[in-house]
Image (spheres, rainbow, N blue to C red):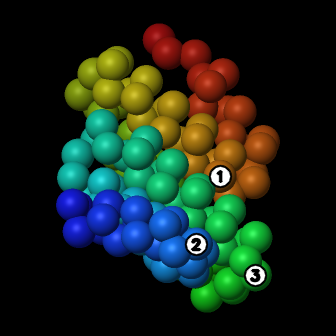
Amino acid sequence: MAHQQQALSIAREIKNSDLEARALLNLGTINLNASQENKVKAIDFYQQSLAIARASKNSEIEQKALSALKSTIELLEKNLVIVRDTKDKLKEINILVSLGHAYTAIGDNSKAIAPFTTRMV
């Protein structure tokens, strides 16, 4: 992770938006694979990468960031089913919040609101 953070710093220093977006994408993937708590960080990195890719009109990175966000959503939805079976409410809340952020990132506002309005029994 340290190398990607260093790459991000250098990309920002030299004002290379393509390299910055790639570093953010990589940091998102690293965080996604780390732990449940890092899923929000991963989504944040993917969101930043997506915004930069769109601003710089880099369709390759934009598609990769969208794909990463959609994969994250699928993973979170699978985790949600498992966590609901264990009745771990704290983990369930964390996953619902992460899902809300991920749906917001891809622009699906109706699905973004649903996790925040889900009633926990």
Q: Report the residue at 30% width, 37% height from top.
A: 37
Residue 116 vertical placement versus 109 (above, below) = above
Is residue 82 visible to us here? Answer: no
Q: Secondary structure at mark 2?
A: loop
Residue 12 appears in the rendering = yes
User: Farthest residue toward the top?
Assistant: 121
Residue beneath disc 1 = 105
Q: Nearer the viewer, residue 3 or 69?
A: 3
Q: Which mark is residue 57?
A: 3
- Across and down, in percent, residue 85 comes to 29, 31
Query: Where in the figure is residue 96, as x and y percent of width and height?
Result: 49, 33
Q: Circle 3 — which element?
A: loop
Give above or below for 74 relative to 92: below
Label 1 amino acid? Ala
- Label 3 neighbour load within 10 Å: few <14, some 14-19, many 20+: few
Label 1: state its secondary structure: helix
Residue at x 40%, y 29% (from the top left corner): 94
Q: How many marks?
A: 3
